[in-house]
Image (spheres, grey):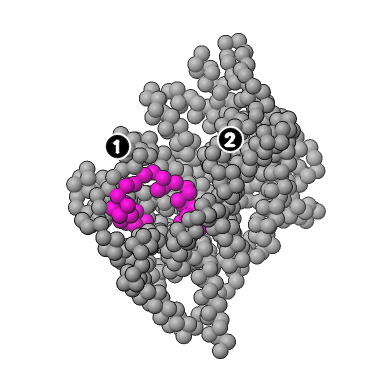
Amino acid sequence: MNNQAKPIPSPAAATGLRRGILGLLVVAVFFAIPFLGLDEYWIYILTIGFYYGILASSWSLIVGYVGRISFAHAAMSGLGAYGSIFASTTFALPLYLAIPFAGVFTGLVGLAIGRLCLRLHGAYLGLTTIAFSEIVRITITAEHEITRGSLGLAAPALFESADRVQYYYSFLAVLLASLLVMWLVLRSRIGLFFAAIREDEDAAASLGVKVVRWKIFAFTFSSVIAGIAGAFYAHFIQLVAPSMMSLQEMGFILSMAVIGGFQNIFYAAMGGIVLEVLLEVLREIGEWRMAIFGAVVILVLRFAPNGLFGGFADYLASLGRRS
Amino acid sequence: MALFEQVVNGLIISIFYALAALGLSLIFGVLKIVNFAQGELYMLGGFVYYVFASLLGLPPVAAVLVAFAALFIVGALVERLLIDPIHAGKVERVDEYAIMITFGLAILLQNLMLGLFGPWTKRPDAILRGRVEIGELIISGDRLAAAGVGVLLIIAVLAFIRYTWAGKAIRAVSQDRETAGVIGVDARLTGMLAFGLGGALAGAAGALIGPVFLVYPTMGVIPVIKAYVIVVLGGLGSVPGAILGAFVLGQVESLATVLIPDTTRALAYKDAYGLVLLVLVLVFRPQGLFGERTRRA
């Protein structure tokens, strides 16, 4: 079909620097926000926004960089949440061990799924991951004697005090740490392997890229991040229900990544934060919010595949070149 | 006797499944994409039926036909606006684009109807009320009538694909889009027709099942997952495979519910059997039972 991807204008070093400075400014703003006397409620919303930022960016790692679709990301986050709850209550692990345990656990699940789905592409992969995610959700709902089903399972709190700002900074730190790790991986040789697999798997293999290894690695890596995010979320919200793994939740993550720009982890993360805030700002219009987001997803995919932030950044870069 | 009743119930459910899955398979055959908004087209069919049969007082069978026609138009429009750009070479990363844009469409349609009609369930008038007794077997009339109309629709669509010129075009483009173009088949028009028919079948399924399982904005979420299982089981793009897959799934589900003694757990897992089947088929035999082997799934 259409294999001739349009060449992406390579950003000049100057615009790269400009983007870096812009990024640091955005981070500085997020660090300063709790000092601006914002209502506690919005601190809470932003904290959830950071959670979605982690999920949207780690999802875009698979879709935007390796070119493989996954609908299992919400399920991975849910597995991390339940995993950490069981580790901390049933096995009485302290949270600083339970949360990494959840990351390892979802990583192993991601490894297994990645291994199983190796040969699958496009729609087939989409269907398999939907099936996996629904099987997990149905099982956790059905085994209500262990998981309390759709009533939800209580989770121990991350901090003893209910201070919102503490949670805000810890989620911001987790988001920045996961973005940093992903960025380091993507700018190493591995990032090039990913791009090679995305553009032409057979050609990549013929040039010596270990296609199997890096595909499985990508799936495992992004699952670990989703699992850790889910674990932190569980100990923040303190009540976890199977609805966390629903396809509707997956729809949120997809919308956030696509609208922000799923070809870039930073834009996807911004999409997560901004959409979560918008969901709250527009609370009055109820269901129409998601209808609007659905429409925006369609328009963005059709007319601005780099997403709103990606498109905006490209626009800024083009201004810079002209002057 | 209980077993026999389960078999008959499974058969009736299978007919509904087949209606929804057939549309998915038609669309995949011609356009090589899975429509992740198929469940929402099914839901729209249910709402069109509700509006025409219950609010405007049309006879139920006529309302089913209205739903069929309305969703044909919706499907054809979706194809022209969102899917056709793929073939015009305006899109990079075709597979992911098609998946994400139909998923986005599903989000849009579901929440649009939530906004318009609210989350409450509606029970539109059925084609037939009461119960039908055949020997010792008792079946509710609404299910039997819906299944009957469903069978007629399936036969009509199969005949259309088999005997008309347009049906031949659909089969030709399914086999080879470029060669079909060479011998004078308009592949773009055929794609629109296939998506329209796929939408119409989903719409008719929603209209027929509406009175039985109620109409609400998220009514398509579970049935569409069953439709995925069915088309994968039968092989994506294979029309006889879709029908056979529907019967396999209908029987597996209704029998498995009887065979597991703990009833609450059996019911809770009912929707999972098919999904396990789907994963197994995709991992071990990606071409399905009837699909043709392609170089890469």
Crowd around label 2: few <14 · some 14–19 · many ≥20 (10 Å): some
**Quadrant of the rendered image containing residue A56:** bottom left
Residue A134 rendering spot, x and y as whole percentages: 44, 43
Judge whether A96 appears above or below B29 on screen.
below
Residue A100 rendering spot, x and y as whole percentages: 26, 56
Q: Is residue B281 left or right of residue B200?
A: left
Q: Residue A146: which numbered mark, if any?
A: 1
**Quadrant of the rendered image containing residue A162:** bottom left
- Is A234 inside the magenta-drawn segment? yes
Q: What SS does tag 2 mark?
A: loop
- Is B78 inside the magenta-drawn segment? no
Magenta span: predominant SS is: helix
Q: Which residue, given by chain and number where applicable, does mark 2 sit on?
A: B122
Mark 2 residue type: Lys
Q: Which residues are magenta?
A: A226-255
Judge whether B120 appears above or below A277 on screen.
above
Judge whether B185 appears above or below A208 on screen.
above
Residue B129 in view? yes
Q: What SS does tag 1 mark?
A: helix
Residue A224 in view? no
B16 or B60, which lies in front?
B60
Q: How many marks?
A: 2
Chain ID for label 2?
A: B
The residue shown at (57%, 21%) is B8
**CA separation in Å, label 1 and label 2:** 35 Å
